Image (cartoon, rainbow, N blue to C red):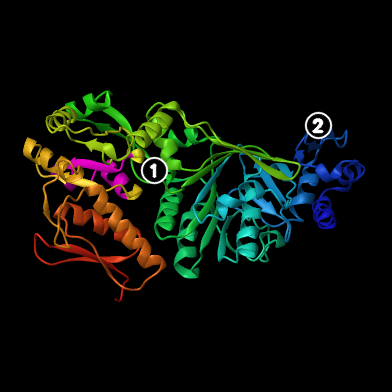
Amino acid sequence: MGHQINQELQALLDKLPPRIRAPLSSEEDIESLLEIIIDLGRAPEARFPNRDTILDDCDVTQEDIDYVTSRISGFGDDNRAGIARTLHRISAIRNRESRIVGLTCRVGRAVQGTAKIIEDLIQSGRSVLLLGRPGIGKTTMLREAARVLSNDMRKRVIIVDTSNEIAGDGDIPHHSIGHARRMQVAATNRQHAVMIEAVENHMPEVIIIDEIGTELEAAAARTIAERGVQLIGTAHGNSLENLMVNPTLSDLVGGIQAVTLGDEEAKRRGTQKTILERKAPPTFGIVVEIQDHYKVAVHPDTAEAIDESLRGQPPAAELRWLENGEVRIEKPEPSKRAHDIKTEHQENGRKEGPRMYLFGINRQRLEEEARAMGLKIGITDDLRTAGLMVTSKSYFRRKPQKIRDAEAYGVPIYVLRTHTPMQLRHMLSTMHPQAAIPRESAHGSDGHETMSDALREAEKASSEIRNNTENPVELNPQSAYIRRLQHLIAERNKLSSRSVGRDPNRHVIIYREGR
């Protein structure tokens, strides 16, 4: 790669006036050159990682600027131009009459190995969003991600290349992107349209996009993600918190909305009546904050990080860095609250039944009914630790975000028709064997079926069908509520299911499509 970088750097130097080029060529660390500044009426300047140097005592003239602009491609509406088959970028500064009075000639380099620090993330198939300040290496990492996915993973990758920033100038893309294809964007305000065109016309498995910056581009990214295409992109902002408060781009991480709770729900949560909640599932499942060229902070579950932040708990990120060519990972310590929930859940085990998340249900009333039945129940305020959501029919019909979150997490939902004590007792007796109503089982013997047993039966049947057998599996008869949950488990495992028979012997059959 060294010889190739020398050739490409020389291609940039050849575009400079001789009096600026000559002193540059004599610099010992020329290979680390970052950019050259050519401003009318000022001395030309070269910038290196740790120093700046004046290249000539004479001020830049209009002829010097014209010398450069006449030897490069035309400037787009974003005032950027390039040099064919290279990654260099020349950006223009114009006066009020649109005449160019300054140039920033930025050196572009393809550096292999920059994506190693997040290689497992981009190979996971999940969408990844890169954040970081300008010049930190976001585009370089995108370019390397394109090469890894197209060459090593043999995936169909398309780069939507605004300003030819990723794959270089000219009609032939730079070799550093591997076998990825590149779609150029004629005008920056058309980037969102080219993103959609890439999906509709070229059947990509991965789309790579730099600098998502408008509401239309954020909406296009969501549309692409909903079609099952992996996205690797960058956005303006240094951190996840920056993105959350950006009204234009917050949709990339699910969006934020104000929600007014009922009196009972606010009291149950111990919060004010008006709170902030995530509006929808994030477009990007993983967020990477680039802190330095070889150090990043990773949020492996964007939805979880956003929810924690909205609950006033700063999300703990996973730190990664390169050390002697090896990736080092420092995972965050689990919060005390999460650890306590997990430990308590393991200790109680099946004594409490599935841990419940109550949504629109009076906790005090449910606990009173449980005490009257001599039962110990587990209730959690964290949906991700729940084995069951309990809600009312009116809430379920409206499909608020919490209901959609439960469905996305695969948490079964028990819907109560009313809040009457009888309905609560019926639900508790379904979940706990000591309170369950005896009935004739599928094999003709008296027994007690619990909800957790029924759900485990459905999970086991789904696993057997996926791994070992093509034959349908018939489950034991269950109530309509539990059958609905068993259908959900089959759907989550990408299997088909149907209910057959008449009550009290109506039961679920799980099978592969076509059987």
Q: Is residue 482 visible?
A: yes
Mark 1 lies on residue: 254
For residue 188, above or below residue 61 = below
Q: Residue at x 36, y 64 (%)?
A: 464
- Residue 372 in which image quadrant: top left
Looking at the rendered structure, the secondary structure element under dot 1 is: loop
Magenta extent = 386-407
Examine the rendered structure and indicate whether residue 196 appears above or below residue 65.
below
Query: Mark 1: which amino acid?
Result: Gly
Instruction: Tell which of 380 and 255 is nearer to you.
Output: 380
Q: Nearer the viewer, mark 2 or mark 1?
A: 1
Judging from the image, what secondary structure is the residue with disc 2 in?
strand
- Residue 286, image x and y in percent? 50, 45
Residue at (41, 31) in percent of width and height: 338
Quick check: 294 left or right of 389?
Answer: right
The residue that mark 2 highlights is: 51
Task: Give the tally of numbered discs.
Answer: 2
At label 2, which amino acid type do we have? Arg
Q: Position of residue 371 (x, y in %)?
A: 15, 29
Residue 379 part of the magenta-drawn span: no
Observer able to see residue 398 = no
- Give 14 or 100, whichever is nearer the viewer: 14
